[in-house]
Amino acid sequence: MNTLDVKTLNVGIIGYGYWGPNLTRNFFEIPMSELVAISDLKGDRLQRARTLYPDVVTTPDYTELFDMDLDAVVISTPPATHYPLAKECLEHGLHVLVEKPLTLNSEHAEELINLAASKGLTLMVGHTFEYNSAVMALKNYINNGELGDIYYLDAARLNLGLFQKDSNVLWDLAPHDISILLYLLGEKPISVSAQGMQSIFEGIYDVAYMNLVFPNRVSAYIHVSWLDPCKVRRVTVVGSKKMIVYNDMEAEQKLKIYDKGVDMPTYTNGGFSEFLCSYRSGDILIPKIQLVEPLRQECQHFLDSIVNHEPPCSDGDDGLSVIKILEAAQRSMANGSTHEVIQW
Ligand SMILES: NC(=O)c1ccc[n+]([C@@H]2O[C@H](COP(=O)([O-])OP(=O)(O)OC[C@H]3O[C@@H](n4cnc5c(N)ncnc54)[C@H](O)[C@@H]3O)[C@@H](O)[C@H]2O)c1
């Protein structure tokens, strides 16, 4: 084990499929980490890793990482494997960054949280958007009252595919939007209802709509889809003073602040004039946001949290909150869109 005052942490990667290479590149480039090993079950993925990182150990057997003097591991494997892999890594005294969703049920998430706490280890989940500068700026606009009272939020994450046989669109895409909403509002929803469609494969939801009710009656809506002609990554926040659209598909102009709103006339004792609201349509502001790769900020934050013995922003509890909401949404979809109260 490295002594932490050296402030260079030995890191291993488990899972080098689609997303793992992005995490790997960051831990390779960040000065505070030493990329020691990469494990993947597939030979072609290991071959690819060896081409890019000839000095890094590669192995199909992740248990070999336990004998490599590592400080931390990064798990980027399919969601069903997160719990057993994270558990084993924590048991071997390693700090763990695990991709979203943390686990596939809240019992497993709670077990990992308790295990990490009992061993004084960092457990972090890869809620990447909490490390996105545009989302951080959006949170600031909400917190400093720029938008006024928040009426509602609307999030859409749509694309054609990628279908997955052992997951559904809710568990695949909604963790991002749920984590964004929890982060933006700084509180947890009271209840959730959801509706889903199984258009292509029976038993696999490929389109889902969720409604989350937060304290103060703020509503949030999430639409996720594997069956849409357009790629959409958008969050809209509508307030009494202004409205903001965060469009992650934009290269530079990710946030647009609309000075738009509706002002009610004073009460006139009935009659048509009550419906003559005035529509305000002012300037559109595009704030300059210093864009840093969100994943770079996430990886750096993981290392900083370990060294500083501080819980990361997207810690195990954050991961558990997302899972409890997903579980409630799944129950609601199965029960005809009932409003499921979430027990926190
Ligand atoms: N944060 C994000 O924006 C983001 C984006 C995409 C995917 N993800 C998440 O990343 C994770 C991986 O997704 P993906 O799209 O890369 O999946 P993938 O199927 O492309 O890759 C997973 C890899 O893990 C390997 N693997 C499985 N079990 C293993 C084991 N026991 N030991 C070693 N390797 C093993 C597989 O061989 C595969 O190469 C998922 O949890 C997904 O939700 C996050």
Image (cartoon, helix red, strand yellow):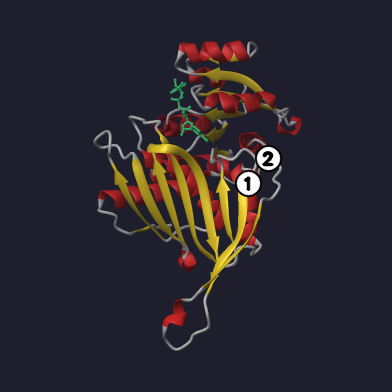
Q: Which residue type carries mark 1?
A: Ala
Task: Residue at 51% x, 29% y: name it.
Answer: 75
Q: Are marks 2 and 1 in contact (CB under 8 Å)?
A: yes
Q: Is residue 141 left or right of residue 82?
A: right
The dot on residue 118 is none
Give coordinates of residue 203: x percent, y percent: 25, 37
Q: Nearer the viewer, residue 269 or 1?
A: 269
Viewer can see residue 217: yes
Quarter of the figure that contains the C terminus: bottom left
Task: Residue at 48% x, 18% y: name it.
Answer: 40
Q: Tell which residue pokes out farthest to the right in this image.
A: 6
Q: What residue sits right under mark 1 in the picture? A: 134
Give coordinates of residue 211: x percent, y percent: 39, 56
Q: Nearer the viewer, residue 336 or 229?
A: 229
Q: What residue sits right under mark 2 in the picture? A: 291
Where on the picture, by quarter, is residue 241? bottom right
181, above or below 315, in the image: below
Task: Residue at 58% x, 11% y: name it.
Answer: 50
